[in-house]
Amino acid sequence: MLVKYEFLKILRKKSTLIVMAISLVLTAFLFGLPIMQFQTYNQNGVIKGTEGIAYEKAQSENYSVLLTEDYITESIQEVQELFENPDNVGTDGNEKFLIGDAYWNEIAPGEKMLNLIAKAYSNPNEYVSYNHMPNLDVSKGANFYKAMEIKREKILNAASSDLSNEQKDYWRNMARNIDIPLQYGYYEGWEIITTSFELLMFAILAICIVIAPAFSGEYQAGTDAVILSGKYGKTKLITAKIIASLLFGTMAFVLHIIVACGLPLISFGVDGWNLPLQIAGLTIPYPFTFLQATLINIGVIYLVQLAMIGLTLLLSAKMKSPYLVLIVLVPILFIPIFLTPSGATGAYNLTLFLLPYRAAIPEFGKYISYQFGGLVLDTFSMRTIVYAALTVITLPLARLGFKKHQVA
């Protein structure tokens, strides 16, 4: 009954309804922006919005294929043959590219896939596209998956990576679990979700704003003396406040996830949920599908939120005003936006990747690892441990902080 009372107390506040409404609208706007701004092209010009989405999806249906060595070899040879005809080729003075019907009929529908294939043969951080295919020698086969492995090895062995032998072996072992040949297909909706997770920081802030008065609001209203002198004021009521805060946070989080994931998937379709992440980036070492990657990162963000709720309750128990709580929380949540990692190793970078804002960004393509002796952990494992530990630490401290509060 106490939990129900505290939960309803949070839910029935006008401020709660206002903050949650604003937060949900903001989340809908941010995750809906790629839908409103979407545009693609055909020979007649630009196609925008839902019409453009439908057009691109229809175009991509012919490129839902298994990327076998034979298929990739044939694709490269077909592009090379197109470049052999001078009438098909244009230039900007630096590079050659296909024009006219050769481009619009043969390249444009599958350009995203062809660019992906071309990138396998490039150096890390080098941009290439289909127009580099004429330089490839595929007379003995494309050796596409060997090229992928070589590219990963270049990243692992680069001086800037500064990885230990144990870390290199960790990533090699992980990459061996990637299913090959890769299945290619349409994955636009999932790509938008996996590249926009950090926008959920605004939802986490909104939840913390609602929970901030949990204890400090009692100080501000002068009801702390009544609560702490009551029969269950220092025991069950404190526990009820914490549980109610966690329940509200979970409910609000689920609502925001439904909005954040629902809008792109309704607009672009759920196609691609079972496709491998590598079709979005060949050097991604994680053997996940788009659905698995999405669920894993949502789990990490949920743990970040629980830890932030724990910190909010701890600050609320220690401070006399909810506004002071937010003055501390806002920098913690958003200062990392202005901090840019200089790599994937080093104490500064590894710490930055664990801060709340950065922890919401999956970083699938980066070989971020934490080593403790012979134990190596990837970024998802480390974030899970850190934020689970913070939750376990802050919640009891919040309980103790209110329990030992001295009434003025």
Image (cartoon, grey):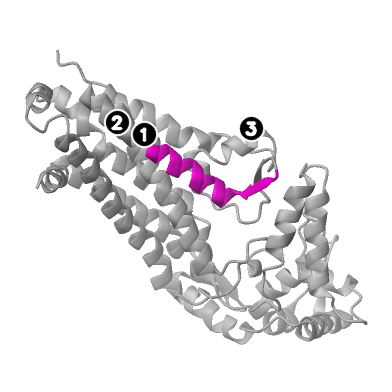
Give the SS element for disc 1.
helix
Q: Is residue 77 left or right of residue 38?
A: right
As shown in the figure, which amino acid type bears the numbered disc 3?
Tyr
Viewer-nearest of discs 2 and 3? 2
Q: Are marks 2 and 1 in contact (CB under 8 Å)?
A: yes
Residue ID at (43%, 37%): 390
Distance from disc 2 to disc 3, alpha carbons, whole Å, reads 29 Å
Q: Nearer the viewer, residue 182 or 190?
A: 182
Circle nearer the N terminus (3, 1): 3
Q: Is residue 204 left or right of residue 70?
A: left
Q: Pointer 2: what residue?
A: 398
Residue ID at (60%, 71%): 276
Distance from disc 3 to disc 1, alpha carbons, whole Å, reads 24 Å
Give the SS element for disc 2.
helix
Q: In which quarter of the view is residue 275 placed?
A: bottom right
Q: Is residue 96 left or right of residue 99?
A: right
Q: Residues within 10 Å of mark 1 (few under 14, many from 20)?
A: many
Q: Pointer 1: what residue?
A: 394
As shown in the figure, which amino acid type bears the numbered disc 1?
Thr
Residue 195 percent coordinates (x, y): 53, 57
The quadrant of the picture occupied by the C terminus is: top left
Give the SS element for disc 3.
helix
The label shown at residue 348 is 3
In the figure, 399 relative to 49: above or below?
Answer: above
As shown in the figure, which amino acid type bears the numbered disc 2?
Ala
One can see residue 283 in this view: no
Viewer-nearest of discs 3 and 1? 1
Q: Are marks 3 and 1 in contact (CB under 8 Å)?
A: no
Distance from disc 2 to disc 1, alpha carbons, whole Å, reads 6 Å
Whether 377 is among the magenta residues is: yes
Q: Which residues are magenta?
A: 374-392
- Across the whole image, how many numbered discs are drawn on residues? 3
